[in-house]
Image: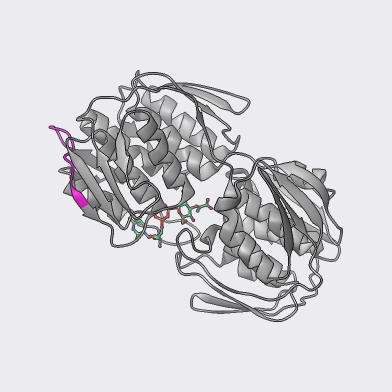
Amino acid sequence: MDYLEIEGDNKLSGAIKIDGAKNAALPLLAATILFKNEVTIDNLPRVNDVFTILQLLENLGATTNFEDNQAKIDASSITNTTAIYDIVRKMRASILTLGPLLARFGECKVSLPGGCAIGQRPIDLHLKALEMMGAEIVIEQGYVRASVPKGLQGATIVLDKITVTGTENIVMAAALAHGETKIINAAKEPEVVQLCEVLNANGVKIEGIGSDELIIKGTGQKLIEAKKNITVIPDRIEAGTYLCAGAITNSKITLNNVNHTHLFTIILKLQEMGFDFDLKENSITIKPAAKIKGAKITTSEYPGFPTDMQAQFMALALVAEGASSIDEKLFENRFMHVSELIRMGANIILSNHTAMVEGKNELNGADVMATDLRASSALVLAALVANGTTRVHRIYHLDRGYVTLEKKLQQLGAKIKRLKE
Ligand code: EPZ
């Protein structure tokens, strides 16, 4: 198993390129099940979650070809409709195949993803919506078995809670359903928007894109024809993580291939903490702060502060002058990084869903354990400013969602190496 060794206490400088968004790529890859011809997707990040969903598509019978950052997927040859546990267990987002498989074939079996490090993460809202569209669903031996012999029917679905992959699953199901589906209280994340835009551009009429009310006019089980290449949007969470690397080391760094609009809330919070920015068309430069101030952070759905940036901002709060409070509203257990940061000398008090972070911590290198994707990046950030050496273990979590994190940090001048246990 690999681990990262980081020597702390140095400044960063220079520029790096941000990759395509993992969380946009995954639903787009799942959506290829809805197409009758080969789909070409560009700017795909070479991260393990993308390899996993490609493996799942191949296991279903699709042909895939992934070179550099471009994948060509032909899902017309799919005959198998079972998403097996051995693949699904590696990545919860495999549940994104449920909607498209059911919509196209009228039946499918998808392994139920288990709980995960950041919380229970039920999929009840995905299932309830598909049932409202006529599906019969049973849970059998760890699998969701769904059938709807005459095809899914459009329905009005009110989501009790805003769910990103839930909205994506319903949109994909509705794309091939008979009649119109309305989703009320839909997620508005840029990744959801891109999925809707791609389907819309390829013949599925979707109204309300980017709002919390979507109306999808289904094709009545007619597969979609891909008209042109899809380019995955830049990863706002990867960009946010590197902005935090610039911030925590109080350095000037530039990120290329970003979309500022998607980073708006993250930029505002960093401005509140004292940082300044230069924005150019597709790039952003963070500049050092005269004084790094503490912040009050509450996670929420887009365009609110993303839960996927909570851990990284906690690391940053450790070096601020003054206290910060971080309220995690989306996932009940997304504080696994706290005890690891405390092992590095952080002063953090957890009470229910709120972490109180004392500023100006003297951080010291230690052996720490990555627990989930974003928690792992927070440990790397803290290590960049800790005294001495930090070793971050179990970095397979990082490899699920960050493209060669150590190489990009090396390019910015960080002393970081990937080593074998
Ligand atoms: C997506 O997860 C992202 N994953 C997550 O990214 C991200 O943290 C999350 O959205 C929130 O932004 C992908 O896009 C692949 P949700 P998702 O359904 O869709 C509850 C990362 O690090 N809920 O929007 O699984 C749920 O428990 C990650 O890249 C139900 O109760 O999240 C949570 O409290 C991890 N029932 C809330 O809704 C349901 O059926 C929001 O979760 C579905 C969700």
Residue at image location 66% in from the left, 60% down from the top = 378
Task: Say if the magenta span includes residue 155.
Answer: yes
Say whether residue 394 is visible: no
Q: Is residue 41 above or below residue 283?
A: above
Q: Range of the magenta residues?
A: 148-156
Residue 303: x percent and y percent? 48, 59
Q: Is residue 408 above or below residue 372?
A: above
Q: Quadrant of ligand 1?
A: bottom left
Say whether residue 337 is visible: yes
Residue at image location 44% in from the left, 35% down from the top = 28
Q: Which residue appears farthest toward the left when viewing the image?
A: 150
The front one of 154 and 32 is: 154
Is most of the magenta stretch helix, strand or loop?
loop
Residue at image location 64% in from the left, 55% down from the top = 240
Residue at image location 53% in from the left, 77% down from the top = 354
Q: Is residue 50 above or below residue 385?
A: above
Residue 107: x percent and y percent? 22, 33
